[in-house]
Amino acid sequence: MSVVGIIAEYNPFHSGHEFLLNQARLIAGKDPIIVLMSGNYVQRGEMAIMSKWSRAKAALQSGADLVLEMPFSTAVEPADLFALGSVSALKALGVENLVFGVENANLNFAYLGKKIAEIPPKSMQFKDYSQTYSTQYNQMVAREVGYEVNAPNAILGLAYAVANYNLGSPMNLNPINRIGVNHDDLLKRNGIVQSASAIRNLLLHDEDKSQLKNWLPKGEAKELASQERYPNWNILFAFLKYRIESSSISELQKIYQMSEGLEYKMKAEIHLAQDFTEFLRRIKSKRYTYSRLRRLCLYVLLNVTQEDMIASFNHESLTLLGFSKIGRQYLKEKRKELSAEIVSKIDKRNSKSGSIAIQVRVDRLFEQIMHVDQNFGQRPSEV
C-alpha cells in the first residue's frame, strides 16, 4: 500500500491545503490519505477560528479519507514535540508516506533530519538568556549541518524529519512546494491562494466576507461567513485575566511549562494590561518567543497542569472526526493491526482519563464561546 499521512491544522482549510491533498493523491493512488488534525486549539497557542468538525468535513470533501484529531498534548506544543507526537501517531496509523508543504521542496529533508538528530545533546544546552531558545537552536543547526533554515514550514518539515529518524524512519518524506503566498503573508485579494493567517485576519476585521468563496470550499466559506463570532484572544482575554487574578502563585506554578518565575511576572502585569497584545508585551523577554508565551497563556486559561499533560501522554487516543468510503474500508481491514487507539464516539467511560479527558475539558470553553457541542453527541462525518 501507499498510505499517505498529512499533519495539519486547517485553520481554516483553504485552496493551498486542497492543492496539497491533490499532490498527496498522486502518491496514494487508490490508498487512503490520513489527516491528523489539531482540534479546537492550535500549535501557536490559539483557539481555532472554527470547530474541528467543520474543518474536518472541509478536508474530507476535498479528498481526505480519514481525519483524526490529534491529542491536545501534541497539538499545543513547540515544533519538536508537535512533530514527534504527530509522526508517532501517523506511524501507529500505518502511514508509509508523509506529505508536507514547504517553501523549498528541493531540500533533502531525510538527510538533514538525520544530521540534526545526531547532534550531541550537549550542543543543545543553551546558556545565552539574551536570545530565545528557538533562535539559538536554529543557529546551532546552521553550524552543525551547514545550512540555515528560517522559513516556518521548512523548520516544521525538519522537525518532522528529525522525529521520523528518531522513530526508525517508518515513513518516506515527501515535501511539496507551497503555492501562492507565504505562511504569514497579508491578504492579496487577487490571489488564488491566501495564507490561513490572512483569512483569519479578514474574518476578524473585515465585514465583507463575500470573497471567502474564492479561497475556501463553498460550504466552508458559507459556514464561516455565517458564524456569529470568531474565536480569538480578544474574546478570551477577560477569561485569562480572571484566571490569573483569581489563582494563587502556588496554583500557577502547577501549570504546564510554567518556569523561571513567569507566574510572578504574570501576576504583576495582568491587572495593568488592557488587552492580550499589551499583556504579551509586558511579560515578553528575549528568552521567550511570543508563540511560547501564547501557549503558556492558553495552558493557564484552560488550567492545564503538568499532571494533566503527563496523564495525556501516558494514554493517548485519536478521535475519529470523519471518513470516506476508502477510509472506512481501511479501518475495517486494518484496525486490529494498528497500534493507535481510535475513538469514534466520546462517552462517559472513555472521557474519564488520558487524552480524551483533557480534550473534553478544554473543549468546554470552545463550547461556551461557540454554543456548539464538541464531543458528546457528535458523530464522525461521512462523505
Image (spheres, grey):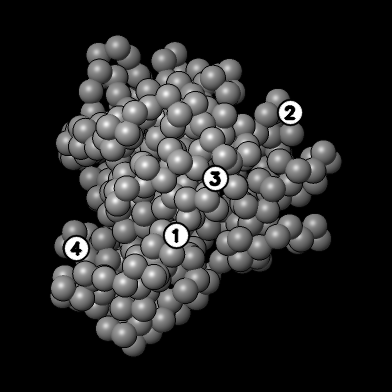
- Badge 4 is on which residue? 166
Q: Position of residue 284 (x, y in %)?
A: 48, 55
- As measured in the structure, the alpha-carbon distance from the residue carrying label 2 to the one carrying label 4 is 44 Å
Of mark 2 and mark 3, the one earlier in the sequence is 2
Comparing 47 with 28, the one in front is: 47
Q: Amino acid at mark 3?
A: Phe
Within 10 angstroms of label 2, few (less than 14), some, or many (20 or more) residues?
Answer: few
- Badge 2 is on which residue? 226
Q: Are marks 1 and 2 in contact (CB under 8 Å)?
A: no
Q: Residue at x 31, y 66 (%)?
A: 161
Q: Amino acid at mark 1?
A: Ser
**Residue 364 to residue 173: above or below:** above
Q: Amino acid at mark 2?
A: Ser
Of mark 1 and mark 3, the one earlier in the sequence is 3
Comparing 347 with 296, the one in front is: 296
Would residue 297 be found to the left or right of residue 48 on screen? Answer: left
Q: Amino acid at mark 4?
A: Asn
Of mark 2 and mark 4, the one earlier in the sequence is 4
Of mark 4 and mark 1, the one earlier in the sequence is 4
Which image quadrant for residue 12?
top right
Within 10 angstroms of label 4, few (less than 14), some, or many (20 or more) residues?
Answer: some
Q: Residue at x 43, y 76 (%)?
A: 149
Q: Are marks 2 and 4 in contact (CB under 8 Å)?
A: no
- Badge 1 is on which residue? 285
- As measured in the structure, the alpha-carbon distance from the residue carrying label 4 to the one carrying label 1 is 32 Å
Would residue 311 be found to the left or right of residue 201 on screen? Answer: left
Which element carries disc 3, helix, strand or loop? Answer: helix
- Badge 3 is on which residue? 279
- As measured in the structure, the alpha-carbon distance from the residue carrying label 3 to the one carrying label 4 is 38 Å
